[in-house]
Amino acid sequence: MKITRIELLPLSSPLKHIFKMREETLSSIDSVVIRIHTDEGIVGIGDTGNTSPWYRGETQDSIMAIIAKVFAPEILLGQDPFEIEKIVARMDFLARDNHQAKALVDYALHDIKGKALGVPAYQLLGGKSVEKVRLGWVMSADQIDEAVAMAQSAVNEGFDLLKLKTGGVDLNEDIRMITAVREAVGPDIEMFIDVNGHWHYETALKAIRKLEPCNLAFIEQPLPYWDIDGMARLRGQVATPIYADESAQDLWDLNNIIRKDAADGLMIKVPKAGGLLKSQRWIALASAAGLPVMCGCMGGSGIEAAAYTHLLAANEWASRFRHENLGPLHIHDVFNTVDQPITDDLARVVPRYQGGYAYLPEGPGLGVELNEDLVPERITRGMSPVSV
């Protein structure tokens, strides 16, 4: 089998509920969907999820350019798509960073291989460790009354872990919001906050101590991504556990965090790691250090969510922990896909979500199909699909 053609589709999917963060306010998910064609008629697909330059420095334009102008002619066209290890290694050799673009290629290759062998992608990743993936609910940085209402709704739907975004420039307002949510959901629901690296050391120290009565499960990325020494120092001064996200990018970042005892746990995103293959290595290193792993997402479609779910259900270490709600629930502003079926997602049929769990797609490859009917109306304004 050989790769014969690659299609790149820049797509924008409107959000049913605006999602607020300190870095940006999202009204749509701007992603790139890939289709890798083969000479045997098998087509692999993948979805980047949202492209946020502040997080990984990648955009729809940059992702499409690096794949079309570098990876396709230099590596992919004419290559056997089963040789995922070889392809991933060559992408890393030819291009520094660009992990979201590399992950997109990785997804489609696993989809092709699974379809060709007639097995779900989780079988390529080691087989099932669990039947379903336990999830927490990620909340927008809304006003206090909105945050309280969302938290209560999520708990009523079966979620027992809440992630709150500290989206304001007023620290005291953030503390009031977090306190109000804790009072509303009670002491038994676990909560954590994501600072996205916006505090400096003194602010983080004061804020975390003020938040101790809220009994947070942990604080995600309180300091800038580069300040691993500061994370280690902060961890030694507070009782609340510290998790690393933006600091935990490549494997050498993880090694540095582990050596310096800079985190109590690690946040992975598959695009941050560079795909399913490299995510397995990422989680293996965390496991060797005994550090829990929570997987986030880029808020993408059911196609992106399917790739994550296969990985998390197959990986024994990752399957022990709860992960962030994976993508389409936020796009469509629903808590489950059984009582509230999704019919306008980029995946023709999204993975099943119910009771705070994501269930494995059982079809071959990623187990989802691109909703071709939606593609023409979702093309990002001012951009065009690319085919090489």
Image: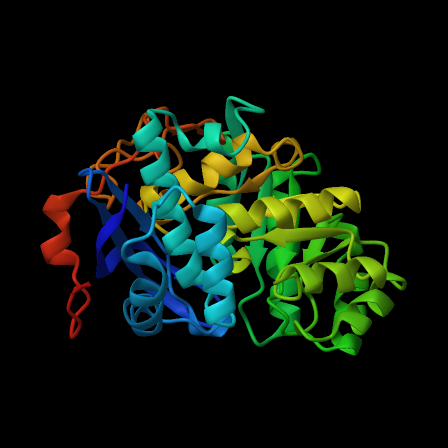
Residue 297 visible at all = no
For the residue pair 197 and 124, the one nearer the viewer reads as 124
Task: Where is residue 304? Give x, y as percent.
Answer: 37, 46
Residue at point 63%, 50% (across, down): 282
Question: Quick check: can you spot residue 362?
Answer: yes
Residue 3 screen position, x and y as percent? 26, 50
Q: Is 159 on the left-hand or right-hand side of 7?
A: right
- Residue drawn at x 36%, y 51% is 300
Asked if residue 139 is positioned above or below residue 50 in the image, the reply reads: above
Quarter of the figure with residue 78: bottom left
Instruction: Judge by depth and name the residue closer to the eye, 297 or 355.
Output: 297
In the image shown, does 218 or 125 lie closer to the viewer?
Answer: 125
Marker count (numbered): 0
Residue 371: quarter of image:
top left
Q: Quadrant of the C terminus?
A: bottom left
Q: How far across and down, in percent of the image, does residue 212 sit?
A: 79, 55
Q: Which picture quadrant has residue 186? A: top right
**Front in this rendered view, residue 311 or 181:** 311
Q: Is residue 93 above or below residue 306?
A: below
**Residue in view at x 31 percent, y 69 percent:** 60
